Amino acid sequence: MEFRERLKALRKEIGMTQIELGEKLNYGSTAIANYEAGRNQPSIPDLMKIASIFDVSMDYLLCVSDIRHPYAVSEETVAMHKFHQYYTQLNEESKKELFTYMRYLVYKQEDTPVKDKAYGEQEVKPILLKASQKSEEYK
């Protein structure tokens, strides 16, 4: 997809005409038609205005990315960032243990067999029990 196609798709998505978009940007009526035909390109300040009008990032508008809001912060994003901070501090053995414990939590929560490709699609219940027990119980 190119800028001209993305602009047209965004405009149609919200039901805006070329004339209406041109008015918002203080353009004549043919300017948007020229952008959508690929005959002209807007200036950087105008690109910023267009991105603002459609509430998308510049990367999305310019087809660099297909993510409309790459910098949107959600509770999940914050939690994943915190998880990543802790995860990167673990050694390889601790990382394996963490994954075993996470599989156990999923198993416990869903009360269904958990299958894992790392274990050949076999049920990992015995491994999960190991995670739920104290080390002296499974050695």
Image (cartoon, rainbow, N blue to C red):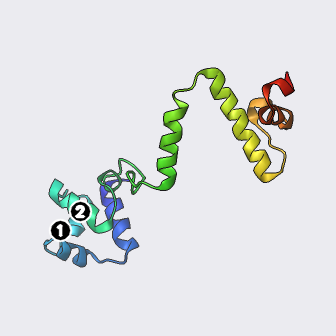
Q: Is residue 27 left or right of residue 62?
A: left
Q: Which mark is residue 31?
A: 1
The secondary element bearing badge 1 is classed as helix
* Residue at 86% in and 27% down: 137
Residue 9 lies, in percent from the top left, at 38, 66
Q: Residue at x 46, y 56 (%)?
A: 74
Is residue 43 something that shows in the picture? no
Looking at the image, do the residues carrying marks 1 and 2 touch, with CB atoms under 8 Å apart? Answer: yes
Nearer-the-camera pick, 1 or 108: 108
Q: Residue at x 66, y 33 (%)?
A: 98
For the C terminus, which image quadrant? top right
User: Which residue is denoted by mark 2 in the rendering?
Assistant: 35
Q: Amino acid at mark 1?
A: Ala
| Residue 13 left/right relative to 39 | right
Q: Nearer the viewer, residue 64 or 53?
A: 53
Residue 68 x/y as whole percent: 39, 57
Q: Nearer the viewer, residue 124 or 53?
A: 124
| SS at circle 2 | helix
Which numbered circle lies on residue 76?
none
Q: Is residue 83 visible?
A: yes
On screen, 113 above or below 13? above
Q: Is residue 99 above or below residue 9?
A: above
Is disc 2 surrounded by few (<14), some (14 to 19) or many (20+) residues within 10 Å? Answer: some
Q: CA distance from mark 1 to mark 2?
A: 6 Å
Number of residues whose C-alpha sits closer than 10 Å to that of mark 1, classed few (under 14), some (14–19) or many (20 or more): many
Q: Quadrant of residue 138?
A: top right
Which of 139/1 is in front?
139
Q: Residue at x 24, y 69 (%)?
A: 33
Q: Is residue 8 above or below residue 60?
A: below
- Disc 2 marks a residue whose amino acid type is Tyr
Q: Is residue 48 left or right of residue 28?
A: right
Report x, y in % for residue 20.
24, 78
